[in-house]
Amino acid sequence: MSDVINRVLAVGAHPDDVEFIAGGTLTLLSKAGVKVYIATICTGDMGSMTRGPREIAQVRFREASQSAEIIGATYESLGESDLKLTFNNSTRMKVVELVRRVKPDVVFTHYPRDYMPDHQITADLVWDACFNAPIPNYYTNQPNPSDPIDKIPYLFYGDGIEGLDRFGSRVSVEFYVDISSVIEIKEEMLKRHESQRSWLKAQHGMDQYILTMRRWSSERGKEVNVEFAEGFIQHKGHPFPRDNILEKILPVIYPRKK
């Protein structure tokens, strides 16, 4: 086990989101002895052109669980429906309960201005949960509620999908993690989401989603002279921790100042 970071929680909107934005980094953390937890707020129930919501949600839960197992991580879904996610007290309490139960040192989630509302709302819910989770008088009204955590965890936002924001502009990431040594594992994780190949082709025009991931990771890598990289931005607003704990155990690279 790492003596720097014990637990990491990565929260995406839908199954496969976490793998796209942080699969390599989570693999490196797992290899360093960190316990990795992956969660999605939504079930993925809109992610099919041929299967109904309940069936595709079950398929995607299995795929996400198999993907997480590759790096020794656990997976869970908070059960919200795709495209119906809202920032309300019900969802806020669910995410706070998740953070309290996992007790993470570090949390990853979406870029707050990513290309779709579910991703943006997830980012806000996770930020909100990290802030609220230590507050004793914040009640989650969940069965068998967990105790408040001792302190606010480190919070990192992943890159926008394909490195772009909701307007198609390039996201300016703060730092990079060199994932060249684990790109094949990231690829294997994404391959477990087999149901998404036809969906991404029909809805997003991404026929080869694995190749899209490699191209995107390669583009980020070239920005800091490595083969493959993932980019991140740290949440440093009051009262979140502002030192980058990741650089103590990961190959973190900062871009050269222009």
Image: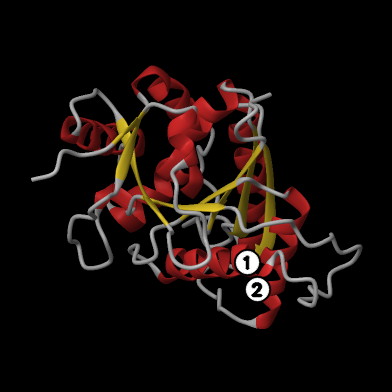
Front residue of 64 and 90: 90
Quarter in which the N terminus is drawn? top right
Find disc 1 in the rendering and name its residue. 129
- Quick check: 7 left or right of 122? right
Residue at left offset 69%, top offset 63%: 79
**Splitting the image into 4 quarters, where does residue 182 fall?**
top left
**Splitting the image into 4 quarters, where does residue 71 fall?**
top right
Whichever of labels 2 and 1 marks the residue nearer the N terminus, that label is 2
Residue at left offset 47%, top offset 49%: 17
Residue at left offset 43%, top offset 33%: 247
Find disc 2 in the rendering and name its residue. 92
Quarter in which the C terminus is drawn? top left
- Quick check: 76 left or right of 185? right
**Residue 23 in sight in this render:** no
Residue at left offset 42%, top offset 51%: 199
Front residue of 150 and 234: 150
Is residue 231 placed above or below 160 in the rendered structure? above
Tally of numbered tags: 2
Tell me how far mark 2 sits from mark 1, CA to CA. Answer: 7 Å
Q: Amino acid under label 2?
A: Arg
Residue 130 x, y percent position in the rendering:
61, 62
Front residue of 211 and 29: 29
Q: Report the mark closest to the observer, 2 or 1.
A: 1
Residue 58 x, y percent position in the rendering:
68, 50
